[in-house]
Image (tube, grey):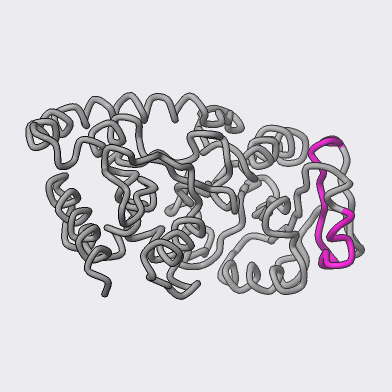
C-alpha cells in the first residue's frame, strides 16, 4: 500500500479510537469512511477538511478514487450497517440533514458529519486536540438528546381505532399507512382491533402477539408481515392490508406468502392492496391477485373488488 495512504488511514483509526469506537469501527473500512465524510484526500491537511453530503455509494466511490480501495458493490450494506449506523448512533454523522423526512428506502439516503464533530476533527494534529476530544465526549449525551427531540418532531402521528395513538417514522409509505389506519379502518372495519402496524424504522410499531396467537397465528419475525393487520371480532375476519406505494400490491406471489404466513388462522383472511391514488394503482393493475380488494386513499369511501362471489370477505375453508 502507498505509504501516504497507509499513514492517513492510521491517523483516521487513531481518531476513531480516541472517540471510543470498538475494533470494528476502527478498522480500515471505518477509517476510510471517516476520511470520505471529511473529504480528506491523501495530501489534504485535517484543518482543510470539508463536510460533504454523501450517499453510501458516493462514499465507496470516494474510497476507490482517492485511496485505491475498491470494495465490491455488495459491500455497500456492510459499510452502512457496520460503520455508518454506529457513526450515526454516536452522533459523529447526521442522516439526511438536507431532508429529515426522506424515506428509509430512498436511494438518496445520505450522511454528513455532525457540525460539532466536524469542528472537532479539523483540530486533529493541533495542540489541545486531546483536551478537545474530552470536552466533545462530555457534550455528546446532550447533543444526542437534542437530535432525538428534533427527529421526533418529524414523526407521523397516527390515531388508532377506538383509542390510542402511535407515531411512525417520517416519509415513505408511512404516510399511506396513516391513511389506512385512520381512513380505511374508519369506513370498512368499524370496531376492528389493530393487531399489527409495520414501520420502516422499527418494523413492529404495533404487534399484539398474544392476540394473534389466540387466533392461531404464530408470527415468524423473519417473515414479511403485511403493513397492517386488523381483526374484526364480530365477523371473525383478519384483514391483511399492504401499502402498495413502495412494495407493490397483493399479487399472486404475495397472496401465497401471506396465505402461508397466516395458514393457522382460525379467522377468515381478507386481502387488501392500498394505494395513494388510482394513478399509482394503474401501474400494478395487471398484477393484482383475484379475490382481493383494492383501496385508494384519495377516494377513501370506495373499494375496488377483484372478482369472486362476494364483496369484501374471506375465501377458502373459513367461508
- Which corner quadrant holds the C terminus? bottom right
> In this picture, is 175 found above or below 108?
above
> In this picture, is 242 found above or below 299?
below
Picture coordinates of residue 217, whole percent (x, y):
52, 63
- Residue 206 seen in render: no
The residue at 39%/48% (across/down) is 39
- Which corner quadrant holds the N terminus? bottom left
Q: 12 or 7: nearer the eye?
A: 7
- Magenta stretch holds residue 290: yes
Picture coordinates of residue 178, whole percent (x, y):
64, 36
Q: 55 or 310: nearer the eye?
A: 55
Q: Residue furthest front?
A: 43
- Magenta stretch holds residue 257: no
In the image, the segment drawn in magenta is 282-301
Q: 217 or 21: nearer the eye?
A: 21
Picture coordinates of residue 251, whole percent (x, y):
77, 67
The residue at 53%/34% (across/down) is 98
Residue 301 falls left or right of residue 259? right
The residue at 92%/63% (across/down) is 307
Q: How many marks?
A: 0
Q: 285 or 122: nearer the eye?
A: 122
Residue 7 falls left or right of residue 106? left
Q: Quadrant of residue 92?
A: top left
- Residue 70 seen in render: yes
Picture coordinates of residue 66, whole percent (x, y):
40, 61
> In this picture, is 214 found above or below 71?
above
Residue 229 falls left or right of residue 18? right
Residue 44 falls left or right of residue 70? left
The residue at 86%/36% (across/down) is 299
Amino acid at each position: 500500500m502507498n505509504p501516504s495512504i497507509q499513514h492517513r488511514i492510521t491517523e483516521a483509526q487513531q481518531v476513531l479510537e480516541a472517540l471510543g469506537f470498538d475494533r470494528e469501527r476502527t478498522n480500515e473500512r471505518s477509517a476510510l469512511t471517516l476520511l470520505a465524510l471529511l473529504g480528506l484526500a491523501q495530501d489534504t491537511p485535517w484543518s482543510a477538511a470539508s463536510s460533504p453530503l454523501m450517499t453510501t455509494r458516493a462514499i465507496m466511490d470516494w474510497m476507490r478514487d482517492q485511496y485505491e480501495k475498491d470494495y465490491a458493490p455488495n459491500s455497500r450494506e456492510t459499510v452502512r450497517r457496520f460503520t455508518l449506523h454506529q457513526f450515526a448512533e454516536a452522533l459523529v454523522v447526521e442522516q439526511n440533514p438536507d431532508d429529515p423526512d426522506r424515506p428509509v428506502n430512498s436511494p438518496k439516503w445520505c450522511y454528513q458529519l455532525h457540525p460539532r464533530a466536524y469542528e472537532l476533527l479539523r483540530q486533529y494534529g493541533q495542540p489541545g486536540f486531546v483536551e478537545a476530544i474530552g470536552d466533545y465526549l462530555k457534550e455528546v449525551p446532550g447533543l444526542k438528546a437534542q437530535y432525538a427531540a428534533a427527529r421526533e418532531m418529524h414523526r407521523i402521528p397516527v390515531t388508532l381505532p377506538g383509542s390510542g395513538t402511535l407515531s411512525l417514522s417520517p416519509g415513505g409509505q408511512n404516510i399511506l399507512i396513516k391513511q389506512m389506519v385512520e381512513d380505511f379502518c374508519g369506513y370498512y372495519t368499524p370496531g376492528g382491533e389493530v393487531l399489527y402496524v409495520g414501520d420502516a424504522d422499527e418494523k413492529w410499531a404495533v404487534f399484539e402477539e398474544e392476540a394473534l396467537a389466540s387466533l392461531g397465528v404464530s408470527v415468524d419475525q423473519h417473515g414479511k408481515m403485511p403493513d397492517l393487520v386488523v381483526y374484526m371480532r364480530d365477523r371473525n375476519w383478519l384483514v391483511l392490508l399492504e401499502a402498495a406505494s413502495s412494495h407493490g400490491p397483493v399479487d399472486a406471489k404475495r397472496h401465497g406468502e401471506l396465505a402461508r404466513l397466516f395458514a393457522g388462522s382460525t379467522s377468515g383472511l381478507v386481502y387488501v392492496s392500498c394505494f395513494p391514488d388510482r394513478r399509482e394503482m394503474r401501474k400494478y393493475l395487471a398484477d393484482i391477485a383475484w379475490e382481493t380488494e383494492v383501496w385508494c386513499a384519495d377516494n377513501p369511501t370506495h373499494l375496488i373488488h377483484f372478482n369472486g362471489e362476494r364483496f369484501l370477505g374471506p375465501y377458502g375453508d373459513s367461508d
